[in-house]
Amino acid sequence: MRVFPIKTLLPKKDDAQRIASLGSGKLSAEVLQSKAQALPESYLRVVKPQFLDSSLMSETQAFYDASRANLSKLIKEKFLLVHEPNVFLYEQTHHSGKKIAGWIVGVDAEDYLDGRIKKHENTLTNKENRLVRHISALESMAEPVLLSQQLPLELNQLVLAITSEREADLSVSDEFYNTHKVWKVETKEEIDLVCNLLNKLPSLYIADGHHRCASSSRYLTERFGNNSGKGIMALIADESELLIKPFFRMLKGVDSTILWDFLEEHRIHHYEIGHSLGYEDLKKGQVLCIAKDRRCVIELSESMLGDKAIDKLDVRVVEKKILQPAFGLSSSSEDDRYQFLRGDTPLDSIKLQLQNGDIDIAFLFAPNQMEEVRAVADEGDTMPAKSTFIEPKIPTGLIIEDYR
């Protein structure tokens, strides 16, 4: 690997809470728009300028011009300050009490293009193109890609030293009661130690941010060429610290009785339950299935698994061995009868959708483990859509890589 310090824009410490915010996919559009309109310093005005001017159409030149103008205003008014290249320590205190730490650095785009940064999801060209245009318009990137690997123990020791000895340079909390802190790595010795240890890694795995990784690598190589010293801004965290959650897979427009008949006919073991289960209660090979009038756990047998890493995933087995033959469903990334919700969504919300007829069946899985993600990536395959929801999620605008 090749990692290095990055030039950044950082919020003024006293303004960070008003500038940084969780973004789309984490908060509703209504909440985001309300925050953008109420807070003149909010970075949401940069990423979503249409919240201030409803006439702006996404992907138009006027949209990108407004986005750039809003960023320039934040810099001019000194809500965002320019910082020379550095390495940063990030730590999230999750609302569960768990602490997740990692290092924010630049990673050479060549590492992604040459396959040393390994992916487990496919990207959409149209979405890549939109992100490239936005990065180009802003000459910056406001949310790091989450990369993971088994990290050297020396880095854990440095985390403890930094977090115990000095106050964070930035600290914000989000709507889910998570706290996000950022420290500048102060000494050259510490910076060299972090970079040298990370440079020895043979590879890194994308845990979150496949489109950002693809788009920023394209932008960097097209704009600056190879070995430019400008990298993909990445948060590199030890895989053991990540919080990995599943998604609900929900079906609309299907008859649930077909599923029960299919399970009986093919002797797939399942048993009814009279109470609610969360994803934490499920073991690998167990799938919670909820319909309007019935609730059961499906147990996947060894005979249903394939030889490849992807064919051992519970999500893949259910799609290929149950849902496709029972309902004639195609891939979950292509069939519009599929819907998705984060696996930590309260079950009462799922029940309400079933009662209202918004969905017909919901499935919940045990979370994938990072070793499963690595195995799929190492074999060059991609996981089914919405297989994992991995935290930490860093607020947009808390740390911004400056390409100017």
Image (spheres, helix red, strand yellow):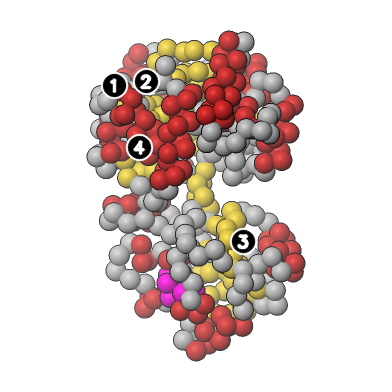
**Which quarter of the rendering shows the N terminus?**
top left
In this figure, which residue is indicated by the disc labeled 3?
A: 278
Where does the image place residue 38, in percent across and percent down from the top left?
74, 26
User: Residue farthest to the bottom?
Assistant: 265
Lower sequence index among marks 1 and 2: 2
**Of marks 3 and 2, the one in the foreground:** 2
Q: Which is nearer the N-term, disc 1 or disc 4?
A: 4
**Disc 2: which residue:** 5
Residue at the spot of label 4: 151
- Residue depicted at 44% across the width and 22% down the height: 139
Callout 3–callout 1 Cβ contact below 8 Å: no
Answer above or below: position of 378 versus 361: above
For the residues carrying marks 3 and 1, which lies nearer the camera in this image? 1
| Residue 372 x %, y % | 38, 56
Q: Which residue is mark 1?
A: 228
- Mark 1 or 4, which is nearer the eye? 1
Residue 213: give x, y in percent of width and height: 39, 38
Tell whether 282 sits left or right of 316: right
Q: Which residues are magenta?
A: 317-324
